[in-house]
Image (cartoon, rainbow, N blue to C red):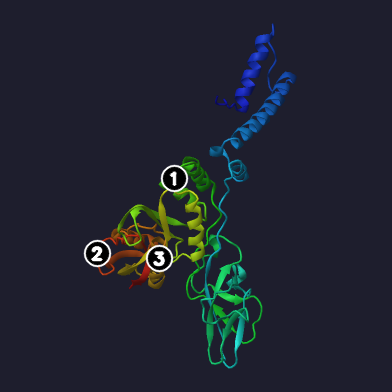
């Protein structure tokens, strides 16, 4: 049954009609009369009660809930909102006089100009400069600088800063003068939105007690945000036919997801796969997109700024492509024009030396390579 909502005027009209219909004489309902004042007070209370009813009804259905009400609704089914993901990347610590050794300890804080976004140095055992014994990155004598892994202090998309934005060191480090990020930080994602939460909840319910592609995809999507995947059935990792076997290819946007993430996905898929089947979980085969183009900007416009906007637009679009998705050649021209209103022409556009779409191979994902704009 749908609630029929009333406004103040309609409530007053109905109450006035009810009062007049029950009276044998004409009732004074003019502005300022006692009976009208009583009816207006009752109408105000009715509006308040109506608002409370609407609030209760909206909170009892996921489709009309928001914020904490969505979380409490999903909690009854063991379904939780995916948290925010911290951006990650690298920062280069350097000095003016590379005389003695220096140490950048894990936990060192760095920030953008104005201290709007802060980051923390973390361990990276694959980095040759990292010392497990010293719990930090060592700058050897005669070496001007070293690159260290960093993550955003606060998870979320705000941590995805552009190259050159990080310039502050939280506290002085002996033998280190400056810090900078030569590449953009990426991977930061805000907490799951209400819209995405509701869509995933529908897939979750549809996948219960099933071992279908939707069921496996729902399990993968619940691991963390920003994942793309493909499920290839009846083939092995070499692309040969193998009945009853399927391959799950997963990417976190980097093109090289960490082994720890693949192990987690291996576990969740194993808990929902069909009985009697085998499977493999792997990262994608990265296909780099090398793009070259020439742009013409309007007179008086900042050409260098337009070039930077085009490169950034291409990179953001390409690095958001899903596993198995093709990169459209014509889309690149569209993105170039959308990057800056000062661009009046795009010419000599090539994608990997061709003028055709870039289609990834089996288990492949397209990621940005050398992007050249003149």
Q: Is residue 173 left or right of residue 164?
A: right
Q: Secondary structure at mark 3?
A: helix
- Which mark is on residue 211? 1
What residue is shown with label 2?
355
Name the residue at the front extreme. Answer: 276
Callout in the foreground (1, 3): 1
* Residue 190 rendering spot, x and y as whole percentages: 55, 56
Front-lying residue, 255 or 150: 255
Q: CA distance from mark 2 to mark 3?
A: 18 Å
Position above or below: 40 against 172 = above
* Residues at marks 2 and 3 touching, judged by CB atoms closer than 8 Å: no
Q: CA distance from mark 1 to mark 3?
A: 36 Å
Name the residue at the right extreme. Answer: 34
Q: Is residue 357 visible?
A: yes
Position above or below: 61 against 191 = above
Q: Is residue 24 left or right of residue 300?
A: right
Q: Secondary structure at mark 2?
A: loop
* Residues at marks 1 and 3 touching, judged by CB atoms closer than 8 Å: no
Characterize the local packing of mark 1: few (<14), some (14-19) or many (20 or more) Cα atoms within 10 angstroms.
some
Q: CA distance from mark 1 to mark 2?
A: 41 Å
Callout in the foreground (1, 2): 1
In the rendered picture of this protein, how many numbered marks are placed on residues?
3
Front-lying residue, 169 or 277: 277
On the image, which quarter does residue 104 sit in?
bottom right
Marks 1 and 3, the one that precedes in the sequence: 1
* Residue 247 rendering spot, x and y as whole percentages: 39, 56
What residue is shown with label 3?
315
């Amino acid at each position: 049954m749908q609630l029929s909502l009333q406004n103040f005027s309609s409530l007053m009209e109905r109450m006035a009609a009810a009062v007049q219909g029950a009276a044998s004489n004409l009732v004074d309902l003019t502005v300022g009369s006692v009976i009208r004042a009583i009816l207006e007070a009752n109408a105000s209370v009715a509006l308040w009660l109506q608002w409370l009813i609407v609030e209760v009804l909206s909170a009892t259905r996921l489709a009309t809930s928001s914020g904490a009400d969505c979380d409490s609704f999903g909690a009854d089914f063991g379904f939780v909102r995916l948290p925010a993901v911290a951006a990650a990347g690298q920062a280069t610590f350097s000095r003016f006089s590379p005389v003695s050794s220096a140490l950048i300890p894990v936990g060192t804080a760095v920030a953008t100009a104005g201290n709007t976004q802060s980051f923390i140095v973390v361990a990276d055992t694959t980095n040759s400069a990292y010392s497990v014994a010293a719990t930090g990155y060592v700058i050897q004598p005669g070496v001007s600088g070293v690159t260290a892994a960093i993550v955003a202090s606060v998870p979320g998309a705000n941590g995805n800063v552009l190259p050159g934005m990080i310039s502050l060191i939280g506290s002085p480090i002996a033998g280190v003068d400056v810090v900078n990020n030569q590449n953009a930080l990426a991977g930061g994602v805000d907490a799951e939105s209400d819209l995405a939460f509701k869509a995933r909840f529908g897939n979750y319910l549809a996948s219960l007690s099933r071992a279908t592609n939707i069921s496996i995809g729902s399990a993968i999507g619940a691991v963390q945000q920003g994942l793309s995947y493909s499920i290839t059935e009846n083939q092995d990792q070499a692309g040969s036919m193998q009945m009853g076997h399927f391959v799950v290819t997963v990417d976190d946007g980097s093109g090289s997801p960490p082994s720890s993430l693949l192990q987690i996905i291996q576990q969740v898929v194993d808990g929902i796969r069909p009985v009697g089947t085998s499977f493999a979980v792997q990262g994608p085969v990265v296909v780099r997109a090398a793009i070259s183009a020439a742009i013409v900007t309007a007179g008086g416009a900042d050409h260098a700024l337009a070039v930077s906007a085009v490169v950034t637009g291409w990179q953001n679009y390409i690095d958001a492509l899903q596993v198995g998705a093709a990169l459209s050649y014509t889309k690149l021209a569209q993105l170039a024009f959308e990057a800056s209103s000062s661009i009046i022409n795009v010419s000599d556009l090539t994608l990997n030396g061709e003028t055709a779409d870039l289609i990834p191979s089996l288990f492949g994902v397209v990621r940005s390579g050398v992007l050249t704009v003149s």
